[in-house]
Structures are given as structure tokens and as C-alpha cells.
Amino acid sequence: MNTATPSAAPPQSTASDSSQAFPPPTALILLASEQLWPNVESVEYWKDSLQHIFIYHTEDERRSVLPAQRLGHFCQARCPHVQVDYADGDGKPESVVAKIEGWLEEVFVDYTGKLVEKNQPLVSIYSPELVSTQQEFLIAKKARDYLGGNPLKEVSSGALSIFESAKDRLRLWDISDEQVKELEERGKPSRTLTLYAPTNGFVLTRNAFPKQRVTPETELYAIADLSTVWVLADVYEYEMPMIQLGQTATMSLSYFLAGPSPAKSPTSIPNWTTPRAL
């Protein structure tokens, strides 16, 4: 598959081929990578005619979805009137990060391409800070239970306020209400925290390994819903008269034995030397 990034400007037309020149594109397909500048040139050049931008997540992004997200933010800032979609499914991939510093104890999803369900366990993390925060929460709970019935309103409300603040701190680390309730019933802190899948989908990237040290900046997984996928196909100039907006097609893969799959072109074709269809 040709994944070359489109140039900033179309080829110069001469008088002999001006009748065959394509009109300005209403849509662009951009390949996200660490090299943002070629895509920036394309968006800047065509921004007056663009109505839709499709961002395609490639495999050579240092196993991260961040370049695609960064490119999407740039497009929305420079072209607020343009609709921006991601070609990894119906929406941009979900990043899974640990909001605390610690070490991975267990890794339950251990390969790229695995299908996961929402709320499925991904990893467990050991964090000394998490353990101490749970202990503070349990102490605050005991103080609330003991002082909650105090006739002095300032004392009872203060104990309740400290308890709620400790609970909110746990929630900020993506600890669910169910996990907090289990902690209250158990009466002692858990050594590890389990992170769960935020959505249904396939694992696009995996940067989680046993005994690995993680920080809030560590992207552990990228998960995307691939129930709807896009196919990039090269369409040559002599084939352009045969392509229509919204035209249906079938796709066959040598490694997929279930037979051809239906496809549809939802957008116009950018003005590239070798146009692409979706």
C-alpha cells in the first residue's frame, strides 16, 4: 500500500492538460506520523475548499496514537469549519494511562491485536502512594463513623468533609465507586490497582510489560473500535471517470476466506498525483 504523504501543492498544470485538471479537493486523507510538517502544508494550502479531513493512523508512529491526536487538534484549530474524523474506526483510539506512579505487577492483555471488552482487566499496578492513600481513606472513614453523630456541627461536618476528600482523591485515579465500596467493606488497603479497558475494541498498541515502571505520562495501551474500518485504495487518473461519490465496491483479501466484503466511497477524492478512495 502506498502511504506517501501528499505534497503541499498540486502539480503545475499546463495549457495542454488544463482541461483535465481536478477541482480543489473538499476532503483530504492525512497519514499521521511524527513528521507533522508535510500534513500541515497540505491543510494550509487547501483549507479554503476543505470540508472533511480523514486522519489515518499508521504503524510507524513509535507505537503511539499521539501523532494522530496531535494532527487532529491542529486541523480543528486551523480549520474550525472542517469535520475531522479518524480512520481507525468510528472514532479516535482510546489511550490507557496510569494516573499514578508505580510498577506493573500483572499484565492481562499481552499482545497487540487482541479483542477486548469494556471493563475487561488490562493490568494491575503496585504504587506505594496508592496504598498510603487507601490507608488515609480508611482512617477518614473511621473518623466519620465515630464523629458523625457528634452534637457539635463543626466536628461532624469536618469529619464528613475529610472523608469525602479522601474518596475524591481515589476517584481521580480512576478508582470506581465499586472498588471504593469494596475497600470500605474490606477495611484494609489493596496492594495493587487494576486498570480496565475503557471501551470495546482491538489493541492497536501495547507498551505494558510485567515489572515495568510507569508514570502518568506512560501510554500503556491504545484501543480502537474496528467494527467499521477504512480501506485506502490508489485510483489512477485514467480510472477517475469510473469513480462516483458514494459508489459501492467489494473488497477481497487473500488471508480472509469469508469472501468479498462491501465497501463504499463516502467522500470526494483529493487532488493528488495518484488520488485515493476510501
Image (cartoon, rainbow, N blue to C red):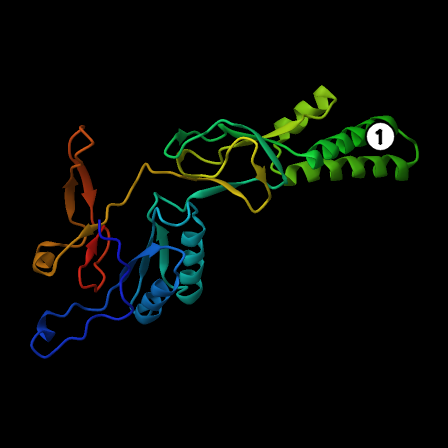
Residue 271 sits in which quadrant?
bottom left
Who is closer to the viewer here, 129 or 52?
Answer: 129
Who is closer to the viewer here, 148 or 218?
Answer: 218
Query: At which x and y percent is residue 228?
Result: 30, 40
Q: Name the side, left or right, on which 41 lies relative to 158.
A: left
Residue 38 sits in which quadrant?
bottom left
- x 35%, y 63%: residue: 39
Looking at the image, residue 179 lies above or below residue 174: above
Looking at the image, residue 20 lies above or below residue 277: below
- x 35%, y 46%: residue: 59
Q: Name the residue beneath numbered marker 1.
A: 143
Who is closer to the viewer here, 193 or 241?
Answer: 193
| Total count of labels | 1
Query: At which x and y percent is residue 16?
Result: 7, 77
Query: At which x and y percent is residue 213?
Result: 59, 38
Name the amino acid, label 1. Ala
Q: Furthest-top residue in view?
A: 186
Q: Name the side, left or right, on which 167 lies relative to 270.
A: right
